[in-house]
Every structure is written in structure tokens, then in C-alpha cells.
Amino acid sequence: MENQIRCFEDIFSEAFNNEKVVTDTSSDQVDVETSVFNIYKQFEKNASMDPDLPKLSRHTHSKILKNWLKGLHKSYECLDASRTWLVYWILHSLWLLNDLPDAETLSHIVQFLSHCQNEEGGYGGGPGQYSHLGTTYAAINALSIIGTDAAYDSIDRSSLQKFLWTLRDVDGSFALHKGGEQDIRGVYCALSVAKITNTYTDALFDKTAEWLVSCQTYEGGFAGCPGMEAHGGYAFCGIASLALLNKSHLCDVDALLRWCVNRQMRVEGGFQGRTNKLVDGCYSFWQGAAFPIISAILSQDNKEMIETVFFNQGALQEYLLICCQARDGGLIDKPGKLRDIYHTCYALSGLSVAQHGTGAGDPYVVGSPRNEVNRVHPLHNVAPHLVYNAVHYFIRHPPPVKDKN
């Protein structure tokens, strides 16, 4: 597949039309499109002198990620309750760039995450903090990336399973923590963790699929809970959860596909998270990863669908490579925003999805072949072989205590 760059002069004809009704939303959209178009025009000039453009600043990103792993600026103090997330985001980004830290550093990370694990099960965002499904998901993913016996054995799966039971409601939904809100993120995190660690049981997720389907909206996407607005992150959680349950046939896949397709921005090339919202680099994964899942679902009835990519892979890569790379490392939400660890992780994850599509064919890489990053498992957002390794390790080493409510 030829990795041609779009003609940016042509795409500006697709610019937002406010139909002579100016609102804050329309003005913001016009400002972003203008900024992005100016960046693309400058890129065209630069590319006329350097045919290898655009380039992924692989070394620069790796360097700042490893610096972040050693210590963070005081501006990150507000994320003290998200330290397991920070570990996962950094490790996963480095794995995508094929530049994981040395074995000693990874061993220290296992020790740190062990201090975040609580006796009652699950992981907090830091040592001594309450267990939360989000930070538990992040810790399990980070340990799966490390992939050593010590990493796997550090997980107390018996207490983890008990923790999952304490968060389950009778309708099949899950709270994110004891006494916390119940939304679709809780279901996804619980399912992903349970599947990877072999603590899944049908009883634990009884009625969960039906609750998930109740979150699908009239637009076709999924909301955080029934009756709310469709959102990219929630849509990913919804369809990924149904796929993990092998119950994707219960939702309206065609409506979901239609909604997802319409979230890719015509000028920018990246994805927005909701209708009438701005482009954001993190939705490169949250929206982008839904497509290989949908392709796999549709291929159950039509085998040709497994190779069908329903979004513009090249346009998404252009947005990420040309508009979202910070000069001194890290990736950003959109032009004018500051880099951060979260957007670095999910922009690189989205770049992987855009390059590898459904995983059935050859990679489609915009720019130099050196821009290719490693492939992710769309259901878990870690490497496919790392998911396989973890799952099979835990199958061979079942938890010592049986499932109890």
C-alpha cells in the first residue's frame, strides 16, 4: 500500500462551515483547523526538501520518557493518586518505541507496584492509597509489559478476584472503587484485568453484557452509563468489553461503526471524542482501536472484513506525526497544547493502530519505514504476545483460592 501524503490544499475545501451561526464551539473549531492547516502548509515546504518527512522523533521521545520514569516535574503532583497509571503509560510508550528500560529498572518497578497493592485486593494509585479499578488495570498492564515471573507472581490474584466481587452490582455493572461511581470504564477495567490474570468467571460477569448494551446511545456510540452522551473512551470500553465477553452480537455494530467513522476530522485527520468537539491526539487510540475490533466482529460473518480498515490510516498518522510531536519529546493533544505522559501514550498507541490496521496485512507506514512502532492488542493496549504470555502463565498457575462472592 503506497504511503502517499494527502494534498493539504485540497483538504482545506473540507473546512468547517458554521452556516453563518457563530458559537464558541464553531469558533474553536475554525481556530484549530486554521492552526493545523498552517502546520500542514509549512510541512509541505519542508517535505519538498526532505522526502523522508514526516519523521517520528523516536530517540527524543524515548529520552524524555526515561527521564519521566526517573522523576517528574512538580506539576505532576496533582497525579499522585495516578502513579500506577504513569508507570503504565511510560512503559507502554517505551515498548511501542522498542526501547524498554534495563532489567534492573524493570525489577524496581515491580517492587514499586507491589507497594501499591492492597491486602483487600487491587491496586491504589500509589503506596497506601485505596484500591481502584483504573489503577488496578494500569498496574496489571504494566506488569504484563515487564512479563517476568517475578512480575506475574507479585499479583495476589485471590484477593484481586475478591476485590472485583466487591465492586460488582446485581445488574452486572461495576463501580470503580468501593462506594464509587458505576460506569462503563469499571466494566472494561474489571474484564481486562480478569481475562489477563485468569480470574474471570461467568458468575462474576453475569448480566454485564446486557448492562453494556443499555449504554449504547441513539447515535451508535456508547455512553458512560445508560442515558448519557456517546463518548470515544466509553465507546472503546463498551465494544472492547463486549468482545472480551464474546457478546458483541448483542449491540448494534453497524450503528457503532457509523458513529466511529464520523469522528475522524476531515481537515485535521485525527479523531474527536464526541460530536461537535475538537480533535484530540488521545482519541487516536480510543476511537482508532474500535475499528480493528469492529472488523473482527464483522469478519465472523464475512471473512473478507478481517482486512478491512474503516478509517483513513494515512490521515491519522499525518496528524500525529506532523501536528502532535513536541519538539523536545513527548506528544500532545493538539497544536498549542503542552506535552504530557497520557497523550504521549495514547497518541503512540493510536499511531500503532493506524500503521497496523486490523493486523491482517502488511503495515501501512506514512513517511520513512523507521516510523513504524510496535503493534498493540486492541482489546488491552499492550502487545499481543505480552497478553498471550500473561494469559498462559496464569492458566498454568491458577489462583490458590476458588471464586467466592
Image: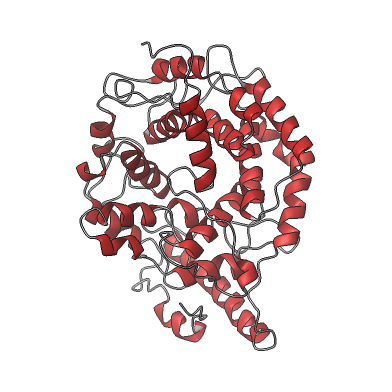
Where residue 335 appears, as percent x and y from the top left, is: 61, 64
Where residue 124 appears, as percent x and y from the top left, is: 59, 23
Q: Residue at x 43, y 44 (%)?
A: 379
Residue 333 versus residue 330: which sits nearer the camera?
330
Based on the displayed image, in which of its 4 quarters is residue 351 positioned?
Answer: bottom right
Q: Residue at x 65, y 56 (%)?
A: 97
Residue 27 versus residue 264: which sits nearer the camera?
264
Left or right placement of residue 232 versus residue 71 in this view: left
Based on the displayed image, in which of its 4 quarters is residue 298 positioned?
Answer: bottom left
Where residue 399 appears, as percent x and y from the top left, is: 48, 18
Where residue 244 appears, as percent x and y from the top left, is: 35, 38
Left or right placement of residue 370 versus residue 250 in this view: right
Rendered view: 162 above or below 288: above
Extreme residue in the front direction: 396
Quadrant, the C terminus:
top left
Rendered view: 267 above or below 83: below
Q: How is the image coloured?
A: secondary structure
Based on the displayed image, in which of its 4 quarters is residue 189 positioned?
Answer: top left
Looking at the image, can residue 219 be seen?
no
Q: Residue at x 47, y 21 (%)?
A: 398
Q: Residue at x 58, y 31 (%)?
A: 139
Looking at the image, can residue 344 be seen?
yes
